[in-house]
């Protein structure tokens, strides 16, 4: 048992990935300059984006960091469900889509340029310099303080659950009314916070078990199924993905290295559970009473939902600044007061997700849906193509520093914090600054305080 992967990073080898950067940027700029043929064939930039993402991961696993959960791998892999899957869905649903192919091609080229800018920042000399300035967490955990923290987290989770049940009208009303209305319950925020406290407590406990040489796969599976059940109440599938990814990352750094096929199997299992959950939730509705066409309709609904990632970028490139002005940072600034309740701050600004959904999908906005735009779309909506380049480069520097800091620490507490921040990164890459800010403020920052508490030496 060793912290495998913590010493796997090699600065000289990671810089060897530099040859991918001009290649990806050159392909993207070449696609932009190639004229109408490329812009009328979105399959070309789509194939280049998939090849760049897969190439970065393969290079890292063979010659670079050799660490599946390095953050450049995570961002490269996130591009596949974020942009590639949605673009394939849009092409598959061609008879019903409303976006011209040249706009989709242009958006995919922007995504390819954004990936190249991120990699340039991640492997720049600024990332290790920033990592060297970050303070390290304690290498030791005080067991008495660990038990105190676990008890406090469980108590907070129980309080949040009671608030949710009370706001929903009691246990009987809750049992009889587990449907989409729960999404709009006044106590939903309390339930989300309760689930998060349980997750922090579980990660602290699980990390201690792994460090002591005792793994608990049966318990992890049981907690996964329980979390999926809670997701059916809350209506947020990301809560289940959070647990799976965090547990995998902890096992990777504190027990034994997780292979690519193992991570893929876990993701497939999770996707199957969520797909089954979606099927159960809509099985009784009028729209699905179509006999043998039910599965086909379910797949179509899922693919339509996946379209909104590239669709938001495509619509932004198409209409900004032609029909709408750039936000010039107002969407990013909305992340600051995001956790303040609106009844305390009635004029709280909307984030980029709300603004773009209102502009491009007003019907969905009216029923309370806020489509996730992705970090690339948010940078573009605020500052255009220069914002995409600068924003993704800065994001690469910050995440490169975070990964290097994690490797320098090599402790139990740093592994927990890294697993939480990795999931927060995914929520931001897929969503916007407001959503990512909410995640870090109600999850990562409180978890950091708890980790500092349990790691403090006498």
Image (cartoon, grey):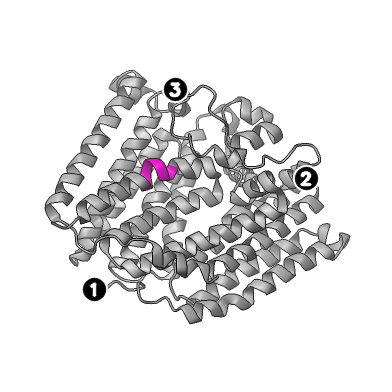
SS for callout 3: loop
Secondary structure under the numbered disc 2 in the rendered image: helix
Q: How far apart are marks 1 and 2 (CA)?
A: 53 Å
Of all residues, the one furthest to the right in this rendering is 36
Return the x and y of residue 218 as percentages of the image width and height: 25, 56
Q: Which residue lies furthest to the top in this view?
A: 169
Asked if the residue under mark 2 is in contact with the one under mark 1, i.e. CB atoms within 8 Å, the reply is no
Q: Check residue 284 in the rendering and tell me which mark sits there, or answer none.
A: none
Question: Would you call the spot at circle 2 few (<14 residues within 10 Å), some (14-19), or many (20 or more)?
Answer: some
Question: Residue shown at 30%/68% (left/top)?
Answer: 410
Of marks 1 and 2, which one's residue comes earlier in the chain? 1
Q: In this view, does 447 lie to the left or right of 120?
A: left
Q: Where is residue 81 in the image (x, y as percent from the top left)?
A: 57, 55
Q: Name the residue under label 2.
A: 318
How far across and down, in percent of the image, does residue 247 sit?
A: 33, 57
Which quadrant: the C terminus?
Answer: bottom left
Q: What residue sits 62% from the left and 29% below the top?
A: 365
350 or 249: nearer the viewer: 350
Residue identified by numbered label 3 = 344
User: Disc 1 designates what residue?
Assistant: 1
Camera sees residue 154: yes
Q: What stretch is highlighted in magenta?
A: 439-444
Which tag is nearer the camera, tag 3 or tag 2?
3
Q: Distance between the residues labelled 3 and 2?
A: 36 Å
For discs 1 and 2, the disc positioned in front in the rendered view: 2
The vertical placement of 442 against 262, above or below, is: above
At a point 36% along the width and 22% down the height, the residue shown is 176
Q: Is residue 442 magenta?
A: yes
Residue 84 in sight in this render = no
Q: Please state the horizontal and vertical placement of residue 306, each as a whole percent of the image.
A: 60, 47
Q: In which quarter of the image is the N terminus?
A: bottom left
Residue at figure coordinates x 54%, y 52% from the top left: 429
């Amino acid at each position: 048992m060793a912290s495998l992967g913590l010493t796997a990073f090699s600065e000289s080898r990671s810089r060897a990935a530099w040859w991918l950067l001009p290649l990806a940027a050159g392909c993207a700029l070449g696609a932009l300059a190639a004229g109408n043929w490329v812009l009328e064939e979105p399959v070309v930039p789509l194939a280049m984006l998939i090849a760049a993402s897969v190439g970065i991961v393969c290079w890292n696993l063979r010659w670079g960091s050799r660490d599946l959960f390095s953050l450049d791998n995570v961002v490269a892999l996130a591009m596949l469900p974020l942009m590639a899957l949605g673009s394939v869905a849009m092409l598959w649903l061609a008879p019903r889509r409303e976006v011209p192919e040249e706009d989709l091609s242009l958006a995919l080229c922007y995504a390819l340029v954004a990936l190249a800018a991120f990699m340039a920042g991640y492997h720049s000399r600024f990332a290790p310099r920033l990592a060297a300035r970050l303070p390290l967490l304690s290498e030791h955990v005080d067991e008495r303080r660990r038990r105190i923290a676990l008890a406090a987290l469980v108590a907070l989770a129980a309080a949040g659950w009671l608030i949710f049940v009370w706001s929903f009208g009691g246990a009987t009303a809750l049992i009889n009314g587990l449907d989409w209305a729960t999404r709009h319950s006044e106590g939903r925020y309390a339930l989300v916070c309760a689930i998060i406290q349980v997750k922090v407590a579980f990660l602290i406990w699980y990390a201690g078990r792994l460090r002591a040489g005792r793994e608990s796969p049966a318990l992890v599976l049981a907690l996964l199924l329980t979390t999926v059940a809670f997701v059916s109440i809350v209506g947020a599938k990301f809560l289940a993905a959070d647990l799976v990814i965090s547990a995998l990352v902890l096992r990777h750094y504190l027990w034994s290295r997780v292979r690519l096929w193992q991570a893929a199997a876990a993701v497939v299992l999770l996707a199957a559970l969520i797909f089954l959950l979606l099927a159960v939730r809509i099985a009784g509705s009028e729209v699905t009473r179509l006999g043998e066409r039910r599965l086909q309709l379910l797949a179509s609904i899922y693919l339509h939902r996946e379209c909104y990632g590239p669709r938001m970028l495509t619509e932004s490139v198409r209409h900004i600044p032609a029909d709408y002005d750039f936000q010039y940072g107002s969407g990013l600034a909305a992340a600051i007061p995001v956790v303040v309740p609106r009844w305390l701050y009635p004029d709280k600004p909307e984030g980029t997700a709300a603004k773009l959904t209102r502009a491009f999908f007003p019907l969905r906005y009216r029923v309370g849906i806020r489509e996730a735009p992705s970090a690339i779309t948010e940078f573009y909506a605020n500052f255009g193509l220069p914002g995409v380049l600068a924003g993704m480069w800065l994001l690469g520097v910050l995440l490169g520093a975070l990964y290097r800091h994690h490797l320098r620490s090599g402790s139990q507490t740093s592994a927990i914090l890294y697993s939480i921040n990795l999931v927060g990164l995914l929520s931001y890459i897929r969503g916007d600054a407001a959503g990512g800010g909410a995640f870090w403020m109600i999850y990562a920052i409180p978890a950091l305080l708890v980790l500092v508490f349990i790691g403090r030496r006498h």
